[in-house]
Structure formats: structure tokens, C-alpha cells
Amino acid sequence: MKVEFYRHNVGEDEIESCVKVLQSLFLTTGSVVDDFESALAEYLGTESVVGLTHCTGALQLSLIAAGVKQGDEVITTPMSFVATSHTICMAGATPVFVDVERETGNIDANLIEQAITKKTKAILPVHLYGQMVDMKKILAIGEKYNLHVIEDAAHALEAERDGIRPGQKSFGACFSFYATKAITSGEGGAFASNSAENAKKIRQLRSHGITSEVAQRNRTGLHTYDIDRLGWKYNMDNIQAGILLTQVGKINAIRQKREDVAQKYIAGFGGNPQIKIPKEYDGIVHGRHIFAIWVNPEKRNKILEYLNTNGVASVINYPAIHLFSYYREKFGFKDGMFPIAEEIGKREITLPMYAKLTDEEIEYVIDTVKKAVSIS
Ligand SMILES: Cc1ncc(COP(=O)(O)O)c(C=O)c1O
């Protein structure tokens, strides 16, 4: 049997919606993007959403909009996809890592205060695997030290903790619509916030710093525009938005299917001392983006190889960021600086978890993982 790492849910509805856009006059950022932004804002319970080309761009623009610049520091986690800290560098700032919680892999909110210096401008937490960090605590720290909190919510479209959902209380949250995400247009991203002012800044930054985008000028009959700051070129187009728009109404139903898969894995691995499943906080909604298992670090690569050669496509999410050559060389990070993140980075294996997995495939994954951890 071959269990793919991911099978997307894009189908007839998305094809139809995409064709409709392709047959229309306006392919770039226009009314379909507006419709998608409104639909997603309604789903998230935020005032505004801005459609972008990727989460990387959403993070970079958020940092810039929050005033982060050369010489500043931004506190973040070493246990994430490298986009998180790369965007801090793209904004000209320095990433300051703090270690993560041993049981979940999320940034340890109790370690943030001691990492704050005069140069700190923002905190950039990541809702790892789909579980939200302790936003209450992190927002309180942000308020106390006058720091912006920007959420990397690439894994957490559906998540909720303590009655807070991404983007509702922070400067803003950044989402990814990359090929394996909860909704996808192959590539894509968004910024969500309850601050219309923050959203307005991102909207300007996504199109070269222009004071009014093409569609707006078309609508208003305005022919001139100004550029009053440097901007980027990260505007979502109508084709991406058309593909995504049809998926917004299906987000919760598809998450439920991933939840069912996760529950079957949890039951299937339950009690196996060689398979640790990250702890889940009580009373949350888990985004269920990544199903991670943590195994013996000495055996991890062998287990991974066994899984892949036996038809269970599995990957690593993530090696600890500070140990990548770029980060070692540029910032002088060394082994042992963030030991919990390092350990998770050596133990982690991500298993296939998506709506289209069949019961037979789920059984096969469970059996193969159990064999892999016992054989190697
Ligand atoms: C935690 C995290 N942040 C940021 C990103 C970057 O997203 P994108 O590929 O849309 O730029 C990803 C992508 O997978 C991610 O997992």
C-alpha cells in the first residue's frame, strides 16, 4: 500500500469557480479577492482579512507594518518552519529565540519576558501543529512592554484557545494556503486582524506601497495614485481567490475529518511507550494541521526511512531553526542553546493526516508505525 503524505480537497466546485474567473475580464486582485476576504473574515470572526500570495509575505508585511526595522529584535520560537524567523530577517531585524514547552513544542510563554531587551519590538509566536499558544499570557506581556504580537497561524485556521481565535486580539494573524494547508490555492496567504488600520497598512504594502490598487481605481474612476512608502508585490489575484472562496464554507467539515483521523491515530498508538504524542491543552479547538509523533532520537531517521520505504509517506516538521547553517553562521547559534526545541527536532515525524484518508489507510499507517518503532 502507498499512503500519500497529502491529498488535497480541491474538486469540481473549485474548478468551476476558477474557470468562472478565467472567463471573466479581471484576473488580478479584484472583486473575487474582496469576496474571499469578506468570507474568511466572517469565518474567523475578525474585522478584516487581506489576501496575499503567501504566509511568508503576510509575516514579513506584518512585521514591517508593526514598525519593525533594521536593528530591532523580534522574539520567536526555534521550533517552526524557517519562514517564521526568515521573515524577521527579511524585515531587517534579528530573531531572538526562546525555547519551547517540552510537552507541546509551542513557545514557552514563561521564557519570553527574560528575552526582552531595549531592542525588542515584537513577539512572533507560532501555533505549532495547530494548537494555539498561550495568547492570554503573551498578549499581557505585549501590553506590559509595549510590544506588538503577530501570530504565525499557518497551522491554525480553525483553532481557538481561551475563547480567542487567531487575529482577534493581536496585531494580526498570518495564514498560509500552501498546497498542504486546510484550504489551498497551491500557494496563497492572508493577514487577519480586528484592526482596520493594520489591515489598511498591509493592503498598501502588498502592492508596492500604492495608495489605491487597480480595482479600486477602476471602481472610483480615479486615474492617478501616489506611492508614499516602499512596498512589496504580494497581492492575491482573483484566480487564487476563486479557488479559495469555494473552500471557506467547507473548512469546519474538512477539519472534522482530520479530527477523526487524529483520534484514530491517538487510539491506535495509545500506550505505546515508543510513540509520544504531543500533549493537547484542555478545552481548545485544535487546528489539526500536523499529526506529529515524537520517537527515540537515535532511531528517528531509521524509523522515517522504514515508513517511507513501506509506503507511509512521512516527513520531519521541523528541525530546530537555530541549528541551520545560515543561523549558526549569521547569528552564532550553537547546539545546546534551546535544548527542548533541539530534542523535538531530532525526535519528530509527521504522519499523513487529511480528509481523504480511508480507514484502511489509517489502519495501515498505525500498523506500519508500530512495526517501525519496534524493528529499528
Ligand atoms: C508555521 C509556518 N509558518 C509560515 C509558513 C509559510 O507559509 P507559505 O508557504 O504560505 O509562505 C509555513 C508553511 O508551511 C508554516 O508551516
Image: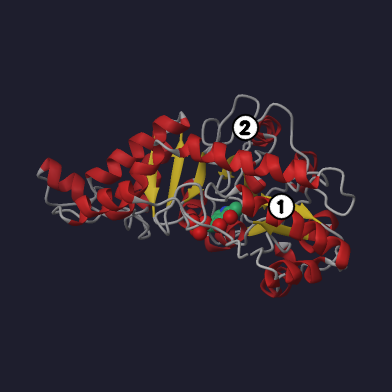
Corner quadrant of residue 114: top right
Asked if 192 appears above or below 324 in the picture, the reply is above
- Residue 108, image x, y percentages: 77, 43
Q: Could you tell me which secondary element the residue under label 1 belongs to?
A: strand
Q: Which of marks 1 and 2 precedes in the sequence?
A: 2
Determine the residue positioned at 14% across, 42% down: 219
- Residue 277, image x, y percentages: 78, 47
Identify residue for label 2. Answer: 285
Determine the residue positioned at 51% across, 36% down: 167
Q: Are marks 2 and 1 in contact (CB under 8 Å)?
A: no
Q: Nearer the viewer, residue 351 or 37?
A: 351
- Residue 97, image x, y percentages: 73, 55
Say which mark, if any, is on residue 292: 1
Specify whether tag 2 is near ligand 1 (CB below 8 Å): no
Quarter holding ligand 1 = bottom right
Question: Could you tell me which quadrant the C terminus lies in?
Answer: bottom right
Asked if 31 appears above or below 306 in the picture, the reply is above
Looking at the picture, which amino acid does disc 2 mark?
A: Val
**Crowding near the residue tagged with mark 2, few <14, some 14–19, many ≥20 C-alpha atoms within 10 Å:** some
- Residue 255, image x, y percentages: 54, 39
Does residue 287 appear in this view?
no
Looking at the picture, which amino acid does disc 1 mark?
A: Ala
For residue 62, side relative to residue 205 (left or right): right
Q: CA distance from mark 2 to mark 1?
A: 17 Å
Does residue 137 appear in this view?
yes
